[in-house]
Amino acid sequence: MKGFTKYFKPIYPVILINIIGYFLLYLYRQPYEQATVFSGLAVIALICITYALIIKLMLGDEYLFLIVSMLVSLGIIMLYRINKELAVKQILWLALGIALFFLCYFIYTRFAKWDKLIFFYLGGALGLFVFTMAFAKNIKGAKNWIFIGDFSIQASEIIKVLYILLLASYYTNPEKLQINGLKLMGREICINHKLVFIVISYCHIGFLILQKELGTAFLLFAVFFLFLFVSGSNVWVMAINACIASIGGVLSYLLMNHIRVRVDIWMNPWADISNRGYQVAQSLFAIGAGGFFGTGLGLGRPDLIPEVHSDFIFSAICEEMGVFGGIAVIFLFFIFVYRGVKISLMAKEPFDKNAALGITLMFGLQTFIILGGVTKLIPLTGITLPFISYGGSSLTTGFISLGFLQAISNKY
Amino acid sequence: MNMERRTIYVLVFVSLLFFILVGYLTCFELFQKDRIVSNPYNRRQYEIEEKTLRGSIYDSRGKVLANSVVTDGVQKREYPYGPMYSHVIGYSSRKYGKSLIEAKFNNYLLGMDDSSAVLSIKDKLTGNAREGNDIYLTIDHELQEKAYNLLGDRKGAIVAMNPKTGEILAMVSKPDFNPDDSELEKNWSNMIDDEDAPFLTRATQGLYTPGSTYKVVIGAAAVENNLSDKIYEDKGTATIDGKKISNSGGKAYGKIDIKTAMAVSSNVVFATIGCELGEDNLKEIAQRVGLGASIPFDIPVSQSAFKYNRMSNADMAAVGIGQGKILVTPLHMALITSAIANDGVMMKPILVSRVERRSGIVLKRQKPSELYRIMSPETASHVKDMMVEVVESGTGKKAAVKGIKVAGKTGTAENELTARQKNKEHAWFIGFAPADDPQIAVAVILEYSGSTGGSAAAPIARDLISAWVK
């Protein structure tokens, strides 16, 4: 066994998957294109160089990046099969993401006052909200995109990172949010920091709902609620928050058409299959068509699913790589969450602990929300599958968070 | 509880979410997907159908019963025997969908099952035309043809099977239809509204009162409760709980035992036995022979029913003679008959023996398996003796075949029409042969025929038995 482990490195399966994937893609795309080979080599080179740097420079946990590189590889292979142009763009985003990963790693390690910037995070998030409300264009029904020249950035991806930092700083220095000596109508009032924090969190969620970013709103609430639990909140505080969320959920179901539509589709996508239920139905067809072993790369019809390159990429993976392939993706996220929680437990300083846990939960819960959505386990709320879906904002902010997590893993 | 511990709880919670997803996906693949992918909005379905040469269906000796041919790039499903297999194989039409074997084994016929997916990767990569898999039925074409002709234009069903293995040898339901796509197109709207229900597969989905054929079940319960040596006084009629029970033609048979009562199909004696057995025994034996349970089969089967909560004496008397709130499918009666022939063991019915790739690799093979043990071998042999007597000297004489010992039971079942009209009884016959080494079990029903089972249904069984047992 020792001899085996000596020659077997965990990076090999990642390389192997890429070699097999691009070989099949090369066969699949007629006429044969050299670009396919070069794309494959580019991805392998990016992954190997990054991994080598992490090992050589001793940047902490080596498995985090390995897991992520497997996810990214699967995602780009699938994208290449669906739409070559998007895959090439995604490879560029991957390069940028890796650069940001190292950058954030070093910034996080050098800069020590992360927990003091709570108002900066808050201001940043509010600024983005106001900016997007005022100037943003509507993409796919969500009003959350910022345009800079030809580029569009999804603000909610940045807000997610800011919210995690805010959360971590609050739980490190809660008293910063305490409002004392506020003069109102001649009386001096004190507002407890817990209440302030809860109000701030609900503001984030409310803005996201207004911008029709239901997936992110749901995600932030889930992270917020789990943090209430981890920080040892009173049972009553949690119960009241659960009540508020339920009432809010019911009210928005009754008042907001786009939320009602989501729930109705979830209950029965077949009733309006040609129209509103079309997407989920196509997703289920794809997952069903693949069976356990999949049709094989390039041999299914994932292109029949609308938005297959972003939110619905998991259905495409299930169709062509089989439900076993899909389960493999879920297990990769599972071990990622395990590593992340372990890093949080090993960390000594409260901010590191909270940030590590927040980032991990963000990835884990986001995965569940979108996978549950495309498989019709829970109502579908548009959100990307971390590291796999196409999208520059999603991939780069994913690597930013990963850089933070990597830095924390190396501190202890 | 400290923060570390709570963090671990959160990890457990998120892991649980992931495992729920994995479980849900697995369940989806196993149980839900077949229903979902066949939705007409799934374009994959007809794209695959167009590029796949749909598999053929053969009888047990390799005779082609259904195949697809391509002319000028258009694929057409052909059924060489027209309506003869319409209630076995069903139809496969782009417009009207699929039924029976064509529906249930669609994935195999199109080569879309998981094992085909792995085996046909080479074809896909080389761009060869896809080929579906072939299906071999347990049906024997010669016997099917015989049964088909014997039933003629009468409404009803015939099921013939091998009692030792559960293999269905012939299965006919009438009225039937021509499953050819263009014929369906012509007749569809008429057939949908037709009161004779030509789309109803009577052999597996027709529910009928069993009438006197149910006496074999009551006979088994009587043997188990030591009533087989008892002598009954048959005066031709009896009144039980205010309900008048009379023998066919009002005949009185005097002092007889159960064997003679079975042979002459005495309603008076069996109604009495029904009451003597009592509610619990009647319910228990009904449950044991599978009434109210679903029968696993390769095409849809209706559930036979025994719809009693509390039973009065009149109910028990009615059940004793196979009337009352009992409903069975012809397939189920064939299974019960087979079980008596097979020492009390009911075999799972099999219609598809195997699925093969064109290259000869077997993808699925159905082996004989036990479904229920409905009675002990001793009881079964007792009932068998009674059934032999039926054919030798009783109501089933017309089922007798020279040189072969046939066991059987006739039935003339009253139904919802007999109360208002004359000559609307169902004519039943169930039987098997040779009694000492059963090779075939048969259930025949002629619905609303108005004749007795002994005169109308028994000769059909006789001809099938003599054709099969050589």
Image (cartoon, rainbow, N blue to C red):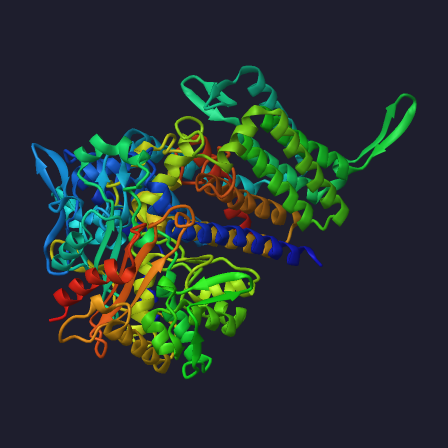
Query: Residue at (21%, 67%) from the top-left corner?
Result: B399
Residue A152 or B136: which is nearer the viewer?
Answer: B136
Residue A121 or B396: which is nearer the viewer?
Answer: B396
Residue furthest left in the image: B72
Query: Residue at (44%, 42%) from the top-left corner?
Result: A375
Residue B60 or B26: which is nearer the viewer?
Answer: B60
Query: Residue at (54%, 47%) from the top-left corner?
Result: A360
Residue B268 or B152: which is nearer the viewer?
Answer: B268
**Is residue A206 toward the left or the right of residue A233 in the image?**
left
Quarter of the image that includes the C terminus of chain B:
bottom left
Query: Residue at (32%, 76%) from the top-left corner?
Result: B386
- The location of residue A233, given as percent across then percent down, is 73, 48
Would you identify the image quadrant in which residue B209 lies?
A: bottom left
**Is residue B389 toward the left or the right of residue A401 in the image?**
left
Q: How many marks?
A: 0
Vertical arrangement, residue B417 with respect to residue A125, above or below: below
- Asked if residue A73 shows in the view, the reply is no
- The location of residue A83, given as percent across then percent down, is 29, 31
Would you identify the image quadrant in which residue B137 lies?
A: bottom left
